[in-house]
Image: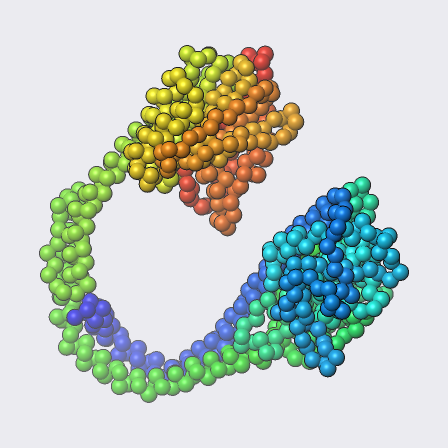
Amino acid sequence: MRIRWKLLILLLAIALVPLGFISWVQHRSLDGLGRELGSHASADLIARAGRQLQQVADHDGATVRRETEIIEQVLRAQAREVERCLATGPPKSPEVFWAEDYDRGEVLPDGMVLSTKHFRMSDRGTREAMPVTYQQQVFILAPRVDRGDVADDVARLSLMPSAYQFVRQAQPGLIHWQYTGMDAGVHTSYPGHGGYPEGFDPRQRSWYTTAITEGDLVWSPPYVDASTRQVMLTVSMPVKYADGTMAGVTAIDVELLSLVRRLEVPSAWSSDARTLIVETRNRAGGGTTGILIRAQQSYAKEGQHWNLPIDLEWLDSGDEAQMREMTANMGGHRSGLYKMSYQGRDSLWAHASADDRNAHVLLIVPYEEIIAQAMEAEADVLSRTRRLLRTAGIMLVVVVVIVLLAAFRGSKVVTRPVADLADAAGRIAAGDLEACTNITTRDELGELGRAFNDMVPQLADRMRLRESLTLAMEVQQNLLPDSPPRIEGLDVAGKSLYCDETGGDYYDFIELTEMSPYCLGVVVGDVTGHGIAAALLMATARALLRSRADRPGGMADMMDDINRRLCADTGGRRFMTLVYLLIDAKSRTLRWVNAGHDAPIIYDPNSGRFDELVGGGIPLGIEGAWSYDEYSSEASPDGQIIVIGTDGIWEARNPQGNMFGKEALREIIREHADRSAEDISLAVTETLTAFRKTRSQEDDITLVVVKVLPRDAAAPPTSSA
């Protein structure tokens, strides 16, 4: 018999006397309680629906923000490519296809296919797919523009298809058209297609005029695309020639329906729910602030004239006070939930900010759709309560009989194994690791007793293993340098922070006094994985490196020899990255060998420029026949800072999953360039700790900082308190 049944019998036996009295009292009040529960359930569902609607609005706002940020980043990259093409010399024989080429169909580029997202109205009034090509673009001239006058711009822009295709990969599901309109009257659009109406002049379109007026990236109001008659939202920005003069505007179209359909609404409400993208704006003439609908599904009407603007609607409700409150919250980029009338129906309104400018996602759901689920829940609770009243009496009699028959034996059977377990646990707590239980039952308590007896020897083994790991950690820590060396002309600092008891990161300072009192060898390595195996491989590499560092021969030969020995020891199953840097403080020269490690970072505070000691080979322990190369650099300037680290620094993540990154490391180096090497090292580790917040360290962190002192410096700068 399972222990849960035994416990049930015991609990029922204890509750028998009060159960008889309480059942009589509760029987009379159950019906009223059922009604109260139904009312509470209804209210709870309504409140939950409001919270859910707000969560959906917040999620949709974040979705729009993410999508628009990606589109804006893509547009900026597209603008850079346009300006790059405009700054180059025009090719002599550009491949150009004009709109009339596509319309006549006599000379067409390769790759023409029927598009799955570009549609237009046929002469028969049906919606049909447009033929497009993703290998070419289309050129069109504004009225009264001669091809000869814009030949250079046409030739330069003929280089754009590959750039359009590349940036399109960032968001192919949303990007509809990509195009560039020049002030001289040239217009190019990608993918290549026909269907432009007569008299089309891109310079008269709102996306062009708004971008020129604002002089920066802007989102234009919805408008009808000239080729497809589909409603678009456009983001555009100016582009310039190499001399800084205005060249024109480049833009990306996002189909309005594609953006609106990405916003999620619970399926139970989707039929009557309204999904809007709105913005707060001053009403013309009145000076009051209202809410203008920037995007909604009703704007996308078939067959609209391409040259007529879309009449944007203002959002209104009979509750003026709540409308003013919602408008104010939108102006402050705050989310909100309201119950207001919409088109004559009581509705729930939920909004959330969608960007850093003035866009918001607004969801409106009729109140009766939400309350209908709550009313069903209330009726269900009442029905269940009435059924419970009919069966309560019968069940009470049955429970009393069962409790009387099983109470005496059940209590004895259940409590004896529990007492045995408690006694054994007490002996283990007192230090007796040979304690065991004698439970012979075949229920969960019996299984627990057997598991308890199996656990005690494993506990002793784990205690011994913990002692061994502590000893291994002490040994490994002793292999790292106690303190940085004092080399005239250099300020040196280094540290390792392991995420486990033992780790795979390694750094070392090798003083080469026989070579020169001004020479210092710096080693930083990173073994794959953590734990004992990584620590052993690290110790082996350290011993091999130290045994070879002061022997004759080049640095590359030394690395070749260490690699062969590690491959022989590990069989290619484990490997480590390592960089060995030799610094001569007197001659200001650097020599290094890199075995698959991240390149050391070099910062010159005099010029404010960052650089890296590039060059290297594969990690040690992979291929024994690999030959490494030695690199060198001369004339290190005063104050130059050399930073060598492991990926535990820039791959550290905060609770949101964002990586720390190398750019943040460079910023710390730049801000503390006038401080000592120890201060720079301390600033990095403290910033990493603050960045991770509550997230634990997931990888070993190792950092070595070397600062080249001025030739007349008496000593390295002291570390601040």
| Rendered location of residue 341, percent (x, y) | 67, 76
In terms of depth relative to the viewer, which is nearer, 121 or 379?
121
The answer to whether residue 38 of the structure is visible from this angle is yes
Q: Where 302 falls versus 555 (above or below)? A: below
Q: Quadrant of residue 339?
A: bottom right
Q: Quadrant of the N terminus?
A: bottom left
Q: Quadrant of residue 573?
A: top left
Extreme bottom residue here? 390
Extreme right residue here? 144
- 400 left or right, relative to 276: left
The residue depicted at 50 percent of the width and 20 percent of the height is 583
- 146 left or right, relative to 369: right
| Rendered location of residue 617, percent (x, y) | 45, 34
The residue depicted at 58 percent of the width and 80 percent of the height is 368
Q: Quadrant of residue 299?
A: bottom right
The residue depicted at 53 percent of the width and 77 percent of the height is 268
User: Total label count?
Assistant: 0
| Rendered location of residue 620, percent (x, y) | 39, 34
The answer to whether residue 645 of the structure is visible from this angle is no
Color style of the picture:
rainbow
Q: Where 41 falls versus 684 (above or below)? A: below
Q: Where 458 falls versus 670 (above or below)? A: below
The residue depicted at 54 percent of the width and 67 percent of the height is 51
- 327 left or right, relative to 47: right
In terms of depth relative to the viewer, which is nearer, 494 or 125?
125
- 538 left or right, relative to 607: left
| Rendered location of residue 609, percent (x, y) | 63, 30
